[in-house]
Image (cartoon, rainbow, N blue to C red):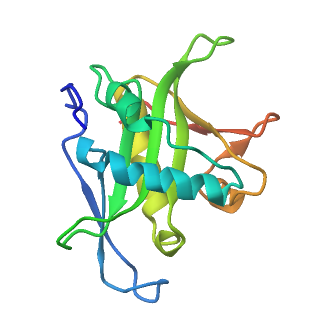
């Protein structure tokens, strides 16, 4: 599959984390969170399928990869994406992903980052990756002059994580996270 080229100047850096001793899973492995690449789209579909199953839903493949090319790699992008992996293997295996977009509130007419999806395979959770991913999302918010990040989740999802980062549930079970513009 071929995607057209688009500017990705916002994403030039990957972030590496080392598992904490005593954490679940293999210790002392490097975990990388980096921007989504065109070559990741096939694995992304598999992660989306796992994510849907985790939330009790089903998705069917219907040429998402072709549409993702226009969404993730447009200039400017309609969707921003990051993936998590354990680098060093002959073939990089993606262990999680996050996708977001810039939206504007009708009521306030103020832009915000909308976190569409964040998913980590169970063995990748509780290593600080989710917090790192949301930190990258806060960077995106700063770059676009957004003062908050919003998302929604199923009631059965792990709301403890969202509360631990300062997320506040709204009446529609949509979450918001303030982002300081001063720095």
* Image spot of residue 100 (x, y percent): 47, 35
The structure residue drawn at horizontal position 60% and vertical position 45%, both measured from the top left corner, is: 59
- The residue shown at (22%, 34%) is 2
Q: Can you give x and y, in whole percent of width and height, for residue 147 in the image?
A: 51, 28
From the viewer's side, name the closer residue of 121 and 175.
121
> Is residue 73 shown above or below 120?
above
Write the residue at 61% across / 52% down.
52
Residue farthest along the bottom direction in this orientation: 22
Looking at the image, which is closer to me, 7 or 27? 7
Relative height, residue 171 to residue 59 (above, below): above
Give the percent coordinates (x, y) of residue 28: 31, 83
Which quarter of the rendered picture does the N terminus lie within?
Answer: top left
Q: Quadrant of residue 75?
A: top left
Is residue 143 toward the left or the right of residue 89 in the image?
Answer: right
Residue 86 horizontal side relative to residue 125, left or right:
left
Q: Quadrant of the C terminus?
A: top left
* Residue 182 appears in view: no
Q: Is residue 144 left or right of residue 1?
A: right
């Amino acid at each position: 599959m071929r995607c057209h080229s688009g500017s990705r100047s916002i994403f030039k850096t990957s972030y590496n984390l080392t598992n904490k001793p005593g954490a679940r899973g293999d210790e002392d492995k490097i975990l990388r969170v980096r921007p989504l690449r065109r070559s990741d789209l096939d694995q992304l579909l598999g992660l989306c399928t796992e994510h849907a199953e985790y939330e009790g839903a089903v998705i069917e493949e219907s040429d998402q990869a072709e549409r993702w090319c226009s969404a993730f790699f447009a200039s400017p992008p309609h969707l921003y994406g990051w993936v998590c992996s354990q680098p060093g293997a002959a073939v990089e295996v993606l262990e999680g992903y996050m996708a977001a977009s810039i939206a504007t509130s009708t009521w306030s007419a103020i832009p915000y980052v909308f976190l569409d999806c964040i998913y980590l395979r169970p063995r990748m959770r509780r290593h600080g990756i989710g917090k790192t991913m949301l930190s990258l999302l806060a960077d995106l918010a700063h770059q676009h002059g957004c003062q908050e990040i919003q998302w929604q989740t199923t009631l059965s999802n792990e709301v403890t994580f969202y509360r631990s980062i300062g997320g506040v549930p709204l009446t529609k079970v949509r979450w918001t996270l303030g982002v300081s513009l001063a720095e």
